[in-house]
Image (cartoon, rainbow, N blue to C red):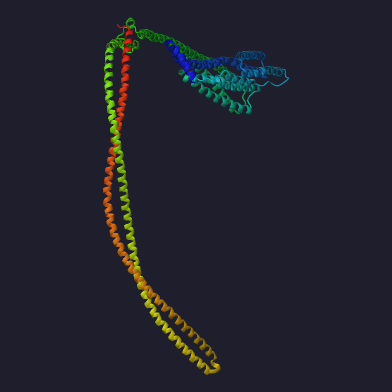
């Protein structure tokens, strides 16, 4: 992609301005050419459609002649009133219409219409042969050829594109010519055949009346449709390509004649259909129907002619519009080409002159450039001078030459001053460079000293910070110890209170055990009495003999139980005695422990008071150390700033020395440039 763009750019760079303007004009003209092509193509499409419609509309007389010939042939070939001369004349007309239609289908190479016409051509000899046989009494009458003619008419309308007509006036005329009128004529033809058949048979039968009444209804409906379709072209004709005078003059007259004759046929058909008696052999229906057919063919003919006229008007209108579009496009292109040529000359001629003047300036020939500029200067009024770029370019080049001339004169005069000034600047720079070197050495020494001070102060600040941190930690630990001592004091007080409570409870226990001794003494006395009672019972049992054996057993068991109770009471008494001894020892131990806890609480209270004073002193020491720490940090920051400032000053001195060295080099180049400027100024030929 970039290769193609570079190739295109190099191609355009090789072109002159005139050729570039020409290519630009062609590029701008290309969309208009495409638009003109589509406009002309649109007109050509409408013209081709209209031409095809005209070709089909001009064939309508031949189709009408075919319908008229077939109708007359059907009437003339009626078996009851056949007239050989009329039949021959009708056959000649039909054959002529078929030949005309065959020539048209061959000219337009219409396969569908040709196929439809072939049905007519094939049916025609068969119809003629069958009529000859029927006339000779060898067969029945042939059927009507109207369906084949109607089929051909529809195919012809499709192929000629009449059915696609885009305008309302010509469309409804086409609809009349291809649809409405053929149906009307076909119905009239059937009414005529029924009328002739009834006249030949001597009157209408009931079946014929019903059919005749149906045809009357159809004719009435077809006439209304025909009237409605014909009213539209008369109303909208002025909207399309102007008003058609012949359409408004001829169509209403022929339509009025057809309407009157068809209404007569309808009235007579209804009258005949409603009569109960059989009329005589002569009626007026056949005559009025014949007149209606002639009026229908007349309207058909006029409709076809007016349709051709409307289509030709449309064709002429679009051909005129196409020619006008092409003419205006050609004239516009010619005018645009002339304007492009004038604009191109108005741009290229001053540009060539400016190029020559620029060449003289590039060669240093300012005098020749001024002479060429004066020779090619245009004379404009104020308005033109403010709008024409060529005049502005000429004025700008003139001012440039004057300014360049003045500049070169000033440069030539100032170059010597520049050389002298460069020499003085060189001497001053050398002196300044020596001064800056001394200042840089002093600054380096001060910088080293400030760095040492900064390092010392920073270390001292760190030490004070650590001491402050240690004091703070010691105060925190002392506070924690104070809190722990308070907790220990409270714990010992709780132990003292608990010991006192335990001592009281042990004393109560001792008193209770003394009460137990009394109970045990009572139990022992009861056991002795029980033993005596059991002894008395045993004695009484011995006295009773065999009747007291049971009491003896009970007395023995009671005595044994009393002995066990006495033994148990003695054991309990021993246990109680031991427990009392233990309680007395426990009371003495608790009292001793309580006294020790009291003494420990008092010692912890004294220790707590001492720690409180220590914490107070540590708390007072911490802010003082913090103040000292902040002061040392401020001193350290100040020392760091001094050291940094001295470093920056040292760096500035070094950069100043380097800048002076560079400035010295620039001064040398300025001196050399002044010499070169003098040489270059000498190249110009000043005015």
Residue 623, position in %: x, y? 27, 49
Q: Is residue 637 left or right of residue 160?
A: left
Q: Is residue 635 above or below residue 123?
A: below
Which residue is situated farthest in the right direction here? Answer: 138
Name the one closer to the observer, 434 or 233. Answer: 434
Q: Is residue 579 left or right of residue 68?
A: left
The answer to which image quadrant residue 61 occupies is top right
Residue drawn at point x = 32 percent, y = 17 percent: 668
The answer to which image quadrant residue 55 occupies is top right
Q: Is residue 546 above or below residue 58?
A: below
Residue 18, position in %: x, y? 42, 10
Residue 155, position in %: x, y? 60, 20
Name the one closer to the observer, 535 or 343. Answer: 535
Q: Is residue 176 visible?
A: no
Q: Is residue 133 visible?
A: yes
Q: Is residue 294 left or right of residue 680?
A: right
Total marks shown come to 0
- Specify the quadrant that holds the C terminus: top left
Q: Is residue 398 left or right of residue 306?
A: left
Name the one closer to the observer, 672 or 89. Answer: 672
Q: Is residue 235 above or below residue 366?
A: below
Residue 593, position in %: x, y? 35, 69
Name the one closer to the observer, 656 or 560. Answer: 656
């Amino acid at each position: 992609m970039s290769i193609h763009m570079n190739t295109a750019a190099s191609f355009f760079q090789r072109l002159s301005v005139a050729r570039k303007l020409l290519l630009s004009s062609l590029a701008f003209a290309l969309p208009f050419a495409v638009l003109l092509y589509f406009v002309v193509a649109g007109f050509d499409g409408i013209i081709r459609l209209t031409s095809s419609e005209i070709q089909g509309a001009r064939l309508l007389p031949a189709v009408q002649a075919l319908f008229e010939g077939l109708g007359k042939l059907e009437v003339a070939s009626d078996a009851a009133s056949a007239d050989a001369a009329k039949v021959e004349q009708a056959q000649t007309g039909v054959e002529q219409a078929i030949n005309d239609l065959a020539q048209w289908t061959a000219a337009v190479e219409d396969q569908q219409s040709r196929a439809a016409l072939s049905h007519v051509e094939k049916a025609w000899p068969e119809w003629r042969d069958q009529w000859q046989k029927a006339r000779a009494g060898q067969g029945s009458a042939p059927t009507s050829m109207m369906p084949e003619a109607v089929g051909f008419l529809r195919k012809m309308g499709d192929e000629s594109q009449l059915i696609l007509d885009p305008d309302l006036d010509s469309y409804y005329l086409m609809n009349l010519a291809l649809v409405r009128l053929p149906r009307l004529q076909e119905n009239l033809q059937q009414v005529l055949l029924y009328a002739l058949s009834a006249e030949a048979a001597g009157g209408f039968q009931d079946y014929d009346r019903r059919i005749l009444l149906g045809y009357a209804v159809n004719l009435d409906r077809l006439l209304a449709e025909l009237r409605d379709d014909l009213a539209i072209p008369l109303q909208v004709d002025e909207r399309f390509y102007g008003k058609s005078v012949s359409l408004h003059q001829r169509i209403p007259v022929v339509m009025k004649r057809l309407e009157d004759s068809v209404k007569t046929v309808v009235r007579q058909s209804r009258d005949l259909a409603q009569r109960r008696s059989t009329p005589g052999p002569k009626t007026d229906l056949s005559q009025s129907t014949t007149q209606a057919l002639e009026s229908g063919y007349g309207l058909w003919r006029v409709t076809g002619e007016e349709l051709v006229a409307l289509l030709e008007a449309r064709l002429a209108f679009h051909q005129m519009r196409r020619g006008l579009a092409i003419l205006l496009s050609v004239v516009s292109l010619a005018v645009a080409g002339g304007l492009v040529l004038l604009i191109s000359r108005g741009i290229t001629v001053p540009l060539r002159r400016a190029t020559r003047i620029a060449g003289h300036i590039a060669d240093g020939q300012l005098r020749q450039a001024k002479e060429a500029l004066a020779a090619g200067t245009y004379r404009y009024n104020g308005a033109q001078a403010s709008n024409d770029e060529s005049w502005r370019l000429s004025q700008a080049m003139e001012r440039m030459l004057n300014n360049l001339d003045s500049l070169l004169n000033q440069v030539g005069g100032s170059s010597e001053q520049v050389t002298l000034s460069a020499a003085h600047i060189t001497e001053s720079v050398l002196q300044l460079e020596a001064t800056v070197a001394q200042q840089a050495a002093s600054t380096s020494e001060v910088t080293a000293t400030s760095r040492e001070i900064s390092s010392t102060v920073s270390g001292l600040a760190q030490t004070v910070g650590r001491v402050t941190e240690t004091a703070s930690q010691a105060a925190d630990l002392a506070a924690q110890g104070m809190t722990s001592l308070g907790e220990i004091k409270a714990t010992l007080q709780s132990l003292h209170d608990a010991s006192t409570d335990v001592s009281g409870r042990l004393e109560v226990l001792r008193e209770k055990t003394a009460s137990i001794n009394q109970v045990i003494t009572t139990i022992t006395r009861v056991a002795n009495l029980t033993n005596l009672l059991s002894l008395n019972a045993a004695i009484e049992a011995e006295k009773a003999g065999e009747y007291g054996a049971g009491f003896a057993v009970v007395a023995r068991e009671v005595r044994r139980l009393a002995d066990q109770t006495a033994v148990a009471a003695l054991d309990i008494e021993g246990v109680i005695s031991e427990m009392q001894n233990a309680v007395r020892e426990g009371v003495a131990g608790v009292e001793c422990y309580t006294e020790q806890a009291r003494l420990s609480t008092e010692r912890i209270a004294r220790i707590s008071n001492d720690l409180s004073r220590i914490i107070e002193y540590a708390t007072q020491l911490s802010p003082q150390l913090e103040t000292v720490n902040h002061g040392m940090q401020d001193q350290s920051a100040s020392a760091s700033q001094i050291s940094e400032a001295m470093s920056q000053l040292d760096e500035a001195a070094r950069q100043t020395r380097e800048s002076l060295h560079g400035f010295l080099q620039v001064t040398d180049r300025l001196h050399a440039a002044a010499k070169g400027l003098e040489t270059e100024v000498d190249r110009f030929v000043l005015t």
